[in-house]
Image (cartoon, rainbow, N blue to C red):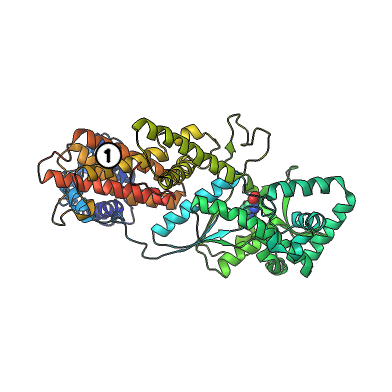
Amino acid sequence: MLDLVDTLKLRFEEALKSAYGNGSDSYEVAISPASNPQFGDYQTNLALTLSKQLKQPPRAIAEAVIGKVDLKDICEKPEIAGPGFINLKVATSYWEEKINAIKSDPRLGIAKAKHPRKVIVELSSPNMAKEMHVGHVRTTIIGDCLARVYEFAGHDVTRLNHVGDWGTQFGMLVAYLREVCPDALTKPDAISLGDLVSFYRQAKKRFDADAEFQNISRQEVVKLQGGDPDTLRAWKYLLEQSRHEAQIVYDLLDVHNLIERGESFYNEQLPEVVRDLQKAGLCVEDQGAKCVFLEGYKNEQGGPLPLIIQKSDGGYNYATSDLAALRYRVTVERAEEILYVVAADQADHLGPVYQVARRAGWVPDNVRIEHVQFGVVQGEDGKKLKTRAGETIRLKDLLQEGMDRARAELESRLAQEGRTESEEYKQQMARAIGIGAVKYFDLSLNRITNYVFNFDKMLSLSGNTAPYMMYAYVRIRGIERKGEIDFSKLPASAKVILGEPVELDLAKQLLAFDEMIETVTRDLLPNRICEYLFELSQKFNQFYEKAQVLSAPEPVRTSRLILCHLTAEAIKTGLSLLGISVLEKM
Ligand code: ARG
């Protein structure tokens, strides 16, 4: 209820002015949610914080302000508590009016941003020399979720896939490709390498064992950078293979509109980036290398730390391509907000890049740049998740396992219930539940922390999980079926009446959707969505337990049906922000 908070603020500021004239000028009233629902809905500590300035005891200020403030249309009479807190209980009629205003709006009354911002979400960004591994699940899922929330809020979102498609590994891979699979260069369509993981591994083995091969690989890097057509063709072929594998994962994860713009895209801009930094007077030569000395960073000996932007041999670094990317995003693409959804262990890489870009004057002050960090996915042993044989787990295999497990559980449930369902239904279910479970689990935890990957927990039907939330939705749709009602066709003249505390609680939670969206765009924490949804489902359960729905007399029955309908819409919308679709039955 963001507009409610704003209105309360305004009314109190007016009251302060009329009680104290200019003595309270430029004071911004803070309205916060009540610490305990017993005291009402909101509270303000304005009397306590103004006491010194106004040279009066807080309770006296609180009384004076309450005498002036006009809240008749919103609240019951404000109460003073403790040393001078003002507690506010919003009138039921106010909640009724608000809930009735949104009763047929699937956006839960949330308007699109009046001033849409241009937002770039950088996500996924695997190294294309290798296949995507489980580490990339987090950036892809978290990034897509944030992109969805920004889109929902009405912003102009670009999802950028900053793939690693340049650099020395490609010299090695091209050299190896020429050796073992020369046909790939002449008949590229005929040959599929499929699994780049094992191809990469074999190439690396060859590279580590043979100095001559290392030489050839280095020459290939030079040829690649020089634009040699043969090498470029081999490089493109490898990228195509990798892209094909990645697309399987993106399709499974239901991630769309990813724009691939990898490191190679910025290659031509690198000399210019260095020149720009020289012009800005930031670039220093140090042992033949060009670098920028960082502020607030120290090397291991406690001395100044340089960010190398061009090596003494003329080559560029990872940081240089990131500087070019940031410069391009701000100056050419005019991004106003850039979210880098990148593992926490790259903080020491991105922090310096942001700093240098700002010092170079590329980034206007009002442009928001955030490193949206996340922790590691661990196995039961607490170490980075690996296969039994100690190899990295492929994302594709992991998602497949999620679907297989969801399928097995479904089959046994169907058998128990004596139901038969079509193969198509089972496949659709297994996919929605299996993938949804992996996504929800990841997004429901604070992204900063590491987590232990556990299918049993993800697929559990109880607790804050995808199956639980999907099931909550199905149950509500079940009420609709049982009552032979169509929620979307409830009479427009019907009104919600909040007679019982459980109804009021549910309505308040429904009306808090906008606050949830705002917190997510502010803190960039998808787990706030899951918390909201879980709380909503609990409030709904309490409501459904205490209040009759189908057997209630009119007009209460229809009023309660509207609450059911709104709850189903809120769950559906909330899950869609997580990239999870609901099922109509389970
Ligand atoms: N390609 C990198 C990796 O897989 C991630 C890229 C992160 N983004 C960036 N702008 N540096 O580790």
Q: Position of residue 130 (x, y in %)?
A: 68, 50
Q: Position of residue 213 (x, y in %)?
A: 86, 53
Identity of the residue drawn at 16% across and 38% down: 500
Query: Where, by quadrant of the figure, is residue 410 drawn?
Result: top left
Do we see residue 371 in this rendering? no
Q: Position of residue 479 (x, y in %)?
A: 23, 42
Front residue of this view, candidates 555 and 244: 244
> Mark 1 falls on what kind of element?
helix
- Is residue 194 shown left or right of residue 258? right
Identity of the residue drawn at 41% across and 41% down: 466
**Residue type highlighted by circle 1:** Phe
Front residue of this view, candidates 275 and 219: 219
To which residue does mark 1 refer? Answer: 540
How packed mark 1 is, by other alpha carbons closer than 10 Å (few <14, some 14-19, many 20 or more), is many
Tell me if residue 155 comes above or below residue 78 in the rendering. below
Do we see residue 246 in this rendering? yes
